[in-house]
Amino acid sequence: MLKFIDLFSGIGGIKIGFENAGFQCVFSNDFDQYCKITYDLNFAEILNIKDQMVLEDITKIQSDKIPSFDVLTGGFPCQPFSVAGYRQGFDDKNGRGNLFFDIIRILKDKKPKAFLLENVKNLKTHDKGNTIKIIYKELEKLGYKVTDAVLNAMEYGNLPQNRERVYIVGFLDKKAFDNFEFPKKITLTKTIHDCLENKEVDEKYYYNNKPLYKKLETAVTKKDTVYQWRRKYVRENKNGVCPTLTANMGMGGHNVPIVLNGKGIRKLIPRECANFQGFPKNYKLPKIADSHLYKQFGNSVSITVIERVAKKMKEALI
C-alpha cells in the first residue's frame, strides 16, 4: 500500500481523502492545539498512538523523525497568499509564507515518489505570477515534474460549495508524471439541502430578535440560497450553492454563511460546514468553542476533490 504523510494536517481532510483512495497515512503534523483535539478525537485509537497528530512547529521537525513514505501531502498555510491574508506571500511577517521551504527541505531529505500541495487560487497570480514560479523552480530543482490545476468543489467534488483551490502535483518518475491527469468535471447533483441539518438548531445560531436582524430580513428572502454576511452588507450566492467557507467566518461576523428557514434567519452551524466540505456523517466534533470549529472547517479541504485527485495519483504511481 502506498504511504503518505499529512503536513499542515488541520483536522484531517486530506488524510480522509487519501485514505478513501487507498493510501495509508504514516505521519501527520500541525501546530494548532485545537486542530489536534479534533484530529485525535477522530483518528487516534487508544492503542494506536501513531495515528495521533504530532503537535509541533514544522520548522522544528527533523526529517529523520518522519517515517518513510511515498507521497507528501500538505495544504500549506494559505493566508499569506489569499486576498483575506493581504497577499503578503513569502514576505508574510509571521513567517507562514516561508513554511513552503520546509516542504522543500523534507522532499529533499526523503525523496518521496510524489506530492500534492493545496492552496488558494490566488497563489497562481500572487506577486504577478512570481510566487508560483519560485514554487515550481524549487520543486523542479529536486527533480520533480510538476503540474497544477484550479479545481472548484462544485465542479469536481459534487459538493454544493463555490470553492476554487489550486492543486500542485509532482512526480519524480517521468512515466508516472506522463500517466497522471487531473480528474474531469462531474455533474453537481447535491443541493444545499443535502448539507443543511434537518434537526432542531440551537437558538444561539438564529438572528431573530438580535440587532442584526433588521439588516438581514430585507435581503435574506429565499430558502434555496446560502447568503453571506460581509460585515456591512449581505451577498446572495446566485449559483444556488454555498459561498466559499472561510477561516474567519466565526470571528467577528465576517463572511458568515446565512440561511432562511421556516423558523427565521440563522448562520450555518459547524456540522453543516463539515457537510459542505464533504466530511463523513460519522466525523465527530469536539466540545470546543464554535469559533475554533468554524476556523477548522474554513481552513480545511473539500474531501471529495482530494479523493479524486489522490485516485488519479495512485493510478499514475502503480
Image: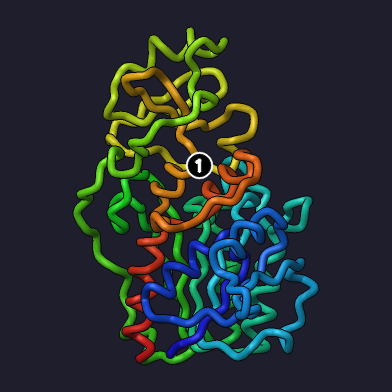
Image-quadrant location for residue 259 = top left
- What amino acid does circle 1 point to? Pro
Element under label 1? Answer: helix
Judge whether residue 86 can be spotted in this image.
Answer: no
In this view, 33 is above or below 211: below
Residue at horizontal 34%, vertical 43%? Answer: 195
For label 1, the residue is 270
Quadrant the C terminus occupies: bottom left
Q: Position of residue 269 (x, y in %)?
A: 48, 37
Which residue is more in the foreground, 90 or 213? 213
Quadrant the N terminus occupies: bottom left
Which residue is more in the foreground, 275 or 41? 41
Residue at horizontal 73%, vertical 54%? Answer: 91
Residue at horizontal 68%, vertical 49%? Answer: 88
Q: Position of residue 293 (x, y in %)?
A: 58, 45
Q: Farthest residue to the front: give it.
A: 46
In this view, 308 is above or below 108: above
Would residue 290 be found to the left or right of residue 189 on screen? Answer: right
Q: Position of residue 80 (x, y in %)?
A: 65, 51
Would residue 109 be found to the left or right of residue 19 on screen? Answer: right
Which residue is more in the foreground, 132 or 38? 38
